[in-house]
Amino acid sequence: MKQILAASRPFSWVNTAYPFAAAYLMATGGRLDATLVVGTLFFLVPYNLLMYGINDVFDYESDLRNPRKGGIEGGLVERSQARVVHRRILVACAVSVLPFLVWLLVVGSLAANLTLLLVVFLVVAYSAPRLRFKERPVLDSATSAMHFVGPALYALMLVGADLGARTVWPVLVAFVLWGMASHAFGAVQDVRADREAGIGSVATVLGAHPTVVASTAAYVVAAAALLAVPWPGWLAAVLPLPYAVNAASFWSVRDDDCERANRGWRRFLWLNLVTGFLVTMLLIAVARS
């Protein structure tokens, strides 16, 4: 259980459950029901176990070469235990995900169900053999972004929200840009490890420095997109800027010293918690306005 728990990255659980719950509550005017509870629980634990568990299993060889694995950034087991533990992780993924998935498909509309299935497919396709979206530059960042935007989009589809509303589309656009920028920046620290393992990514193709530049720019564009949200929502435009500053602080990084970008990635993980608090305060202000 400890190894399965580690594979699910508990530190990051909130990053997927929060978008679903926040989107559902804002779109319904604060409705509390079974669908909110079940959906939030699904995106809190089983979804993360599926996403990160599959990644740990099929990225094991490259993770062995990666010094940052073995803590909050990913579980890592001894080679002698790997086969047994990996089998248990995959079984745990299926056992935990399927009951929630069936329940949500029963209560959802066709559009919502297709969205949910697409989101789950992208989670699997990112790391699973043959598909391996994570090894397809640009698609890797787009898929990773949908891992976090997907729960929010699914919640909006589930309640029949108008995606074209000024309170919705700029947020989704900014969220996708934020997600792509974050994935790309996170890949910088692994450039050498990924190349040694024969794994492609947006960072291995572009190189460490150009990827940092692209990530910084994407964060800035995400901030600009949020200016389209009506008051007081456009105050959210400030929130991507600390991420841009964090990424830009590694402007001088190159492939040979890419590992030092790990400091920025760890800062990113904590920055998410601060940003989450500020988003919560802003959503409360929007709901009361």
Image (cartoon, rainbow, N blue to C red):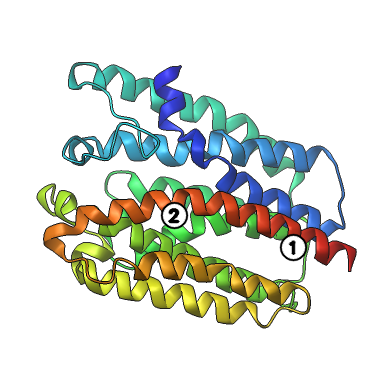
Question: Up-down: is 176 above or below 71?
Answer: below
Q: Earlier in the sequence, mark 1 or mark 2?
A: 2
Q: What residue do we see at 39% from left, 48% from top?
A: 266
Could you say which quadrant of the image residue 226 lies in?
A: bottom right
Could you say which quadrant of the image residue 87 lies in?
A: top left
Q: For mark 1, does the 10 Å Cα neighbourhood hold few (<14), some (14 to 19), or many (20 or more) residues?
A: some
Which residue is identified by label 1?
Answer: 282
Q: Position of residue 68 (x, y in %)?
A: 27, 40
Question: Up-down: is 1 above or below 64?
Answer: above
Question: Up-down: is 43 above or below 218?
Answer: above
Relative to 135, is 177 on the left or the right?
right
Q: Position of residue 16 (x, y in %)?
A: 57, 47
Residue situated in front as seen by the camera: 174 or 92: 174
Q: Position of residue 102 (x, y in %)?
A: 65, 36
Relative to 271, is 110 on the left or the right?
right
Q: For mark 2, does the 10 Å Cα neighbourhood hold few (<14), some (14 to 19), or many (20 or more) residues?
A: some
How many numbered marks appear?
2
Which residue is identified by label 2?
Answer: 268
Residue situated in front as seen by the camera: 40 or 240: 240
Looking at the rendered structure, the kind of residue marked 1 is Leu
Looking at the rendered structure, the kind of residue marked 2 is Phe
Q: Secondary structure at mark 1?
A: helix
Q: CA distance from mark 1 to mark 2?
A: 20 Å
Callouts 1 and 2 close, C-beta under 8 Å: no
Q: Position of residue 285 (x, y in %)?
A: 82, 63
The circle drawn on residue 265 is none
Q: What residue do we see at 53% from left, 75% from top?
A: 222
Does the rendering let one see residue 65? Answer: yes
Q: What residue do we see at 48% from left, 78% from top?
A: 220
Residue situated in front as seen by the camera: 128 or 23: 23
Image quarter (top left, top right, bottom left or bottom right) of the C terminus: bottom right
